[in-house]
Image (cartoon, rainbow, N blue to C red):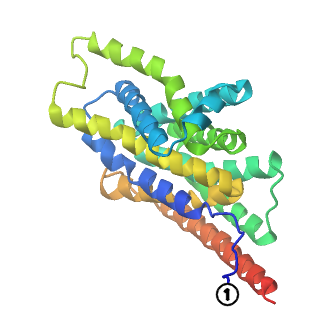
Amino acid sequence: MELPQNDAPPSGLPAALAAYVIWGFLPLYLILVKTVPALEFVGWRIIWTVPICLVIVALRRQGADLRKALGDRRVMLTLTGSAVLIGGNWLVYVWAVKSGHVLAASMGYFINPLVNVLLGTLLLKEKLTRRQWTAVAIAAAGVLLLLGGAYSTLWISLSLALSFGTYGLLRKQVAVGSLPGLTIESAILLVPALGVAYYYSTTSAGSAFGQDATLSLIIMLGGVLTAIPLLLFAIAARRMDYSVLGFIQFIAPTIVFFLGLFVFGEDLRLIQLASFLLIWTALAIFVWDLIARRNRAKIAALP
């Protein structure tokens, strides 16, 4: 007797969860490279991401897909735009964490899900249920509370939210696989990254890479911590509604939020606590709606 075939497309949820958990704990890694200037670190991060991507391409035998994407002008233009966006996002994020603005960085990714919902509904014509719109409204109220006392660092939060939201939108729409796309993005950023590395090697302090074996290995690890979550995110973005993907993203800034309080020693204000509770109430409503609709779909599919 043959087993029934499951024709459902693979879920992007596991990839999304893994990516956001890695990004949530990334500030702990940045503590290890706190002596490296933000711009130089981002340069090395890009430099070491390229060979890691190429190795994975070889292992997965996706060389043909990579060459096909390189020959497509529209794909290359889109990936150039997404590469600039993610490069700028990395620079602002690393600088913010290294400068003691961990909660401002966290706020950027609290805003980002709302950007995703906006882009998903306006540009991708995705539909939200009434319960999901209620969750969006509650989350927006929580974000507005946080923004109320953060005018001096608002530019950090908004630049992170808008750059990553637009990056995800481009990656969702471009006709290229997750890994070849990430490899090309990294290669596009490689030339300016090499320029940055060369510049720091000519300064009086010299390059951070190569002076100490342990620090050099930790810098190289940045390539892995860049490639893996971005690859997972690109997989999730192609398999999930962009609005849903955005709401799951609340996991990462929540982890960063707690790290800012308990590891980096930033103060918790009452308004931040109220905002946090509103955002997680919204997330609970959104997830509840997803589970309820999935259960109804399963029941409807029963013979």
Return the x and y of residue 5 as percentages of the image width and height.
70, 75
Question: Image point 80% across, 52% down: which residue?
Answer: 121
Residue 39 visible within the image: yes
Which residue was labeled with disc 1? 1
Indicate whether 134 appears above or below 163.
below
Quadrant where the N terminus sits is bottom right
Return the x and y of residue 146 as percentages of the image width and height.
55, 53
Q: Residue furthest front?
A: 1
Density class for disc 1 (Cα within 10 Å; few <14, some 14-19, many ≥20) is few
Return the x and y of residue 139 as percentages of the image width and height.
64, 61
Q: Nearer the viewer, residue 143 or 42?
A: 42
Give the amino acid type for the residue marked by disc 1 in the picture.
Met
Residue 159 shown left or right of residue 40 in the figure: right
Q: Nearer the viewer, residue 137 or 74?
A: 74
| Quadrant of residue 168 within the rendered picture | top right
Q: Nearer the viewer, residue 168 or 131?
A: 168
Q: Secondary structure at mark 1?
A: loop
